[in-house]
């Protein structure tokens, strides 16, 4: 990975997480209002669905519904072939218990309720002959129920679409977060590789550094003594950056050039030369300013004498 690619990925990840932070902050500001509105809508939607289901159930709570309210008493009625004909028994008592279940065993959606209500009537029609009273009651109630279901179906379909859209958006968000999390991890590894390469490069440079001659060391020592306070602190910091064991901020620093690595000596040599050039330039500019001031003062003095 090149440095430019690495910088682009870092910028993209920073932008992504910055956007998330902004969204979180906005959500905190508007969360209470949205929560109230969302809760009301959720309660209204839930109440509406429960009311619709309840109304649908009430259609069956008429005088013809009594055979379907509780599980069929197979033993009491002597219906020995019932389980051979009916694969999945169902009744409204069981449906009601599943609708009120709080342990996760209840219905997940309205279509499951619809399916079980149909099953109640279909089982009765399947087991009993067409001329049997139970068959006739089941067929009549099923027709009424189907009409009610057709009225509810558009609302059910809309709720399902909204739920699916929310699921898709959530999955897309999670996928995006996973992508940027992986990118962050890759960047971290790339930065570690860069650090390792820089470390190896520094070690290679140190090994290839020419040793300073005795004359060069003396010149370096002299140059260090000429540095002003600020530049001297910078010089000590240079040593500390390369050799963390060097106490650059101690009250009294003892610098032994013979104990420093060739790499440190070369860094100090380059720094002192540049720093002294800047110091000399600043001193020359200050001297020129002072000279101009003195010249102007002398002119003013001469004018006063003539007067």
Image (cartoon, rainbow, N blue to C red):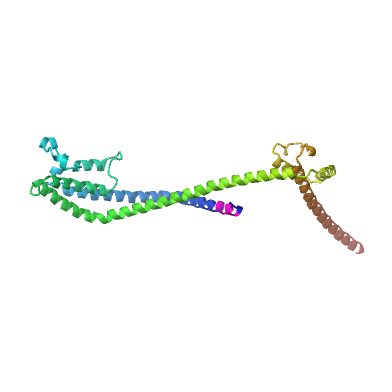
Asked whether residue 24 is in view, the answer is no
What residue appears at the point 13 percent right and 44 percent down from the top-left corner?
127
Q: Is residue 166 left or right of residue 142?
A: right
Q: Is residue 300 left or right of residue 251?
A: right
**In terms of image quadrants, where is residue 243?**
top right
Locate residue 114, reporting x and y percent. Answer: 23, 49
* Residue drawn at x 23%, y 40% as measured from the top left: 97
What residue range appears in magenta? 4-10
Q: Residue furthest right?
A: 306
Q: How many marks?
A: 0
Q: In screen coordinates, is 136 left or right of 274?
A: left
Q: 47 and 2: which one is in front?
A: 2
Q: Identify which residue is drawn at 66% across, 44% down.
A: 200
Tell me, yes or no, whether the highlighted magenta stretch contains residue 6.
Answer: yes
Find residue 21 and report its horizontal and vertical position in percent: 50, 49
Q: Is residue 5 magenta?
A: yes
Residue 299 appears in the figure: yes
Horizontal placement of 306 versus 93: left or right?
A: right
Residue 93 position, x and y percent, is 19, 41
Q: Quadrant of residue 193?
A: top right
The kind of secondary structure the magenta stretch mainly shows is helix
Q: Residue farthest to the left?
A: 131
Q: Give x and y (percent) for residue 254.
A: 78, 36
Quarter of the image that includes the C terminus: bottom right
Q: Name which residue lies at 85% across and 44% down.
A: 215
Viewer-proximal residue among 56 and 192: 192
């Amino acid at each position: 990975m090149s440095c430019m690619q690495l910088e682009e990925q870092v910028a993209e990840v920073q932008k992504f997480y910055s956007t998330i932070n902004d969204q979180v902050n906005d959500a905190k500001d508007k969360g209470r209002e949205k929560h109230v509105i969302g809760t009301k809508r959720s309660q209204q939607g839930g109440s509406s669905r429960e009311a619709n289901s309840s109304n649908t159930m009430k259609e069956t709570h008429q005088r013809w519904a009594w055979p379907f309210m509780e599980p069929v008493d197979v033993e009491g009625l002597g219906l020995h072939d019932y389980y051979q004909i009916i694969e999945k028994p169902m009744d409204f008592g069981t449906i009601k218990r599943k609708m009120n279940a709080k342990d996760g065993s209840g219905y997940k959606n309205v279509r499951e309720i619809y399916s079980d209500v149909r099953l109640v009537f279909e089982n009765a029609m399947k087991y009993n002959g067409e001329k049997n009273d139970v068959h006739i009651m089941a067929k009549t109630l099923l027709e009424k129920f189907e009409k009610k279901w057709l009225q509810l179906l558009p609302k059910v379909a809309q709720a399902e679409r909204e739920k699916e859209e929310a699921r898709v958006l959530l999955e897309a968000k999670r996928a995006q977060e996973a992508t940027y999390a992986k990118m962050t991890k890759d960047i971290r590894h790339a930065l570690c590789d860069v650090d390792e390469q820089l470390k190896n490069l520094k070690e290679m440079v140190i090994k290839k550094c020419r040793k300073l001659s005795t004359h060069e060391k003396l010149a370096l020592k002299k140059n260090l003594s000429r540095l002003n306070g600020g530049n001297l602190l910078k010089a000590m910091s240079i040593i500390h950056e390369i050799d963390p064991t060097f106490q650059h901020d101690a009250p009294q620093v003892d610098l032994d050039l013979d104990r420093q690595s060739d790499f440190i000596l070369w860094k100090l040599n380059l720094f002192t030369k540049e720093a002294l050039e800047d110091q000399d330039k600043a001193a020359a500019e200050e001297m020129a300013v002072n000279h101009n001031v003195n010249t102007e003062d002398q002119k003013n003095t001469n004018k006063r004498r003539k007067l």
